[in-house]
Structure formats: structure tokens, C-alpha cells
Image: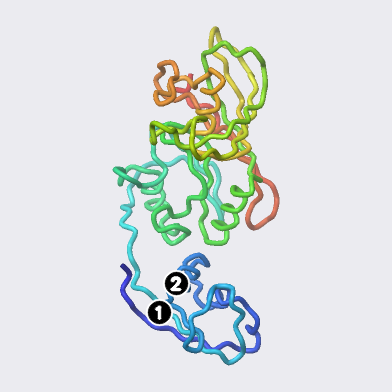
């Protein structure tokens, strides 16, 4: 539980009258993200002339806004000198080529050796971007999936990109290898998925809480009995591509969890990512070539 620390006080001036309370404080406390300020308001660490108000409250000239700043709680994530392949970088974003076998961020049972541990060593400025436990992370790839990922380097980019992913404006293409009797060259899988009824560690079409999921696929090459697919998920559900391909009888090669044929690794690769740049407003696209151990 955060301890009470420094108190800060601001008087609302004429130029700030009518602003939302969270936006007013965002302009005064640049070191805090808007989401963290909203959390302080919700936790009643913010008062307006002695009253507790909500984030959307419109401040008035002359009101006294007092904030109790909690003592900083360190995330506990240890920076590690792990090499990362960077595809592109500017002051707003860093685009990386994630290797297979590497977890994106620390979690249950995993504290070291993640993408975040590596990023905090090479780019320590992301430590205070977004979530304390997942700094800079706006989307994820499964541990065994390789390929393109974008990471935010500042709070503006973090919130902008989070919304782009949430609103499904980011264009994602994956390459997957399957070994099955796929009767059609291309198609659409539109099957709701969620936590499996019997095994909570798995995602399934047999679920009590289905969420819409939409995946396009196309066979782009065949090598003997293997089919190489271009896969474009419109939604971003956990294990979506893996579960959808299993549902049509084509689990991904090397997918132990969902019944894929044995292989040296999961044959799923984030091949390209296209999105609007947070600062320029222009669409940019990044491609990661297939790794040597893919097929």
C-alpha cells in the first residue's frame, strides 16, 4: 500500500477554468500519466477546496486543488543486458524483432529474461511509461511467437498506440505453417473464443464467456505436405490465431498446447505491423523477415 508522501497544492487560474480535473492535474504534474492521476483521484488522494470530486469534474477559478503524492513504489523489474534487435527507433517509439522463446514482460513465475528486462537496460527512459509492471508495452506476442513489436517511449505514444490497438486500426500480418488437409486456399474464421470450460490455461471456442474473434488466412506457399499461411487477425484475442487454426483442423506446427505437429519451435511469426505514427499522423509499416529456424 502506497504511503502518504509529499503534498502539492495548485490554485485554478482563469486560463484553466472549465478544464477536467484530471487534465488540469496532467498539466501540472508532467511526471505522471493521466491514468495514474485518475487513479489518485479515485483513491481520494486529490481534493478540490476540501471536497473529493471525480476525474471529469470541471474546475473553477480560485479553487484549491490539493494532491497527496504517494511515495514512489519501484516496479522491481531488473534491467538485464540482453541483446535486442531494433528495426526502427525515434523519440516516440522503438520497433523490435522479438525472438521466439522470450516472454514479453515479467509475470507469474517469470521475473527475468523478458523483453521488458532487456528494454530497461538498453532504453531505461521507458521505466515510467505506462504500466509499472509492463512499461512501454502496448501489445504482446506469445512467448514462442517471434517477430515485429512496437514499444512506446513516452506517455503520449503509449496512450495513442493503446487506443489504436483497442480500436483495431493497427494492421497485423502473421506467417504460420500448418500440416493439414486445408481444402480452400483462403478464407475467414469468425468464431468467438474465450477461456476453455475445462482447462483455464487454454483458449477455446468452447467457452462460457465468448468474445468475438475474426481471422483472415491465405495459403501463400506449399512445401511438400506443409502449407505456409498469411494470417491477418482483425481482433487481438489471446492465442486467437492458434485457436482459430486449430478450430478448422489446422493447428500450427510446433504448437504443443493446441495439438500441432512436432517442430523445433512454434511456427508463428509476426511478419508485419502497420500503424499511424503518434507524432506524424502518417501510416508506417515494419517487416520482420522469417527467422532461420522457422521452417
- Residue at the spot x=33%, y=77% of the render? 4
Badge 1, how many Cα within 10 Å: few under 14, some, many 20+? some
| Residue 39, horizontal then vertical, whole percent | 46, 68
The mark that comes first in sequence, 1 or 2, is 2
User: Which residue is at the front of the view, 145 or 246?
Assistant: 246
Instruction: Tell me which colouring the rendered structure shows.
Output: rainbow
Image quarter hosting the N terminus: bottom left
- SS state under label 2: helix
- Residue at the spot x=35%, y=69% of the render? 72
Question: Is residue 166 shown above or below 255?
Answer: below
Q: Are marks 1 and 2 in contact (CB under 8 Å)?
A: yes
- In the picture of the structure, the residue carrying the numbered disc 1 is 68
* Left or right: residue 74 compared with residue 130: left
Question: Is residue 21 shown above or below 190?
Answer: below
- Residue at the spot x=46%, y=40% of the render? 85
User: Which residue is at the front of the view, 94 or 145?
Assistant: 145
Name the residue at the right extreme: 282
Name the residue at the top extreme: 224
Question: Is residue 256 shown above or below 3?
Answer: above
Label placed on residue 35: none
Label placed on residue 40: 2
Amino acid at each position: 500500500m502506497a504511503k502518504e508522501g509529499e503534498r502539492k497544492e495548485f490554485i485554478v487560474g482563469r486560463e484553466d477554468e472549465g478544464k477536467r480535473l484530471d487534465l488540469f492535474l496532467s498539466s501540472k504534474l508532467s511526471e505522471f500519466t493521466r491514468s495514474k492521476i485518475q487513479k489518485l483521484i479515485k483513491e481520494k488522494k486529490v481534493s478540490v477546496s476540501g471536497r473529493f470530486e471525480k476525474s471529469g469534474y470541471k474546475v473553477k477559478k480560485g479553487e484549491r486543488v490539493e494532491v497527496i503524492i504517494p511515495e514512489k513504489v519501484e516496479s522491481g523489474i531488473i534491467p538485464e543486458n540482453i541483446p535486442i534487435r531494433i528495426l526502427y527507433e525515434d523519440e516516440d517509439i522503438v520497433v523490435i524483432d522479438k525472438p521466439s522463446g522470450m516472454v514479453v514482460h515479467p509475470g507469474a513465475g517469470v521475473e527475468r529474461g523478458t523483453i521488458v528486462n532487456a528494454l530497461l537496460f538498453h532504453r531505461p527512459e521507458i521505466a515510467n511509461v505506462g504500466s509499472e509492471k509492463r512499461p512501454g508495452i502496448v501489445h504482446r506476442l506469445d512467448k514462442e511467437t517471434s517477430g515485429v513489436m512496437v514499444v512506446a517511449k513516452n506517455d503520449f505514444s503509449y496512450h495513442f498506440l493503446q487506443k489504436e490497438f483497442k480500436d483495431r486500426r493497427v494492421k497485423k500480418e502473421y506467417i504460420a505453417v500448418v500440416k493439414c488437409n486445408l481444402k480452400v486456399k483462403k478464407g475467414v474464421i469468425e468464431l468467438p473464443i474465450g477461456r476453455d470450460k475445462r482447462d483455464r490455461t487454454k483458449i477455446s471456442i468452447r467457452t462460457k464467456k465468448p468474445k468475438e474473434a475474426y481471422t483472415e488466412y491465405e495459403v501463400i506457399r506449399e512445401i511438400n505436405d506443409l502449407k505456409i499461411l498469411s494470417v491477418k487477425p482483425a481482433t487481438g484475442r489471446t492465442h486467437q490465431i492458434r485457436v482459430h487454426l486449430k478450430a478448422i483442423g489446422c493447428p500450427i506446427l510446433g504448437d504443443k498446447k493446441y495439438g500441432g505437429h512436432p517442430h523445433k519451435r512454434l511456427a508463428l511469426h509476426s511478419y508485419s505491423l502497420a500503424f499511424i505514427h503518434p507524432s506524424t499522423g502518417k501510416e508506417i509499416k515494419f517487416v520482420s523477415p522469417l527467422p532461420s529456424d522457422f521452417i
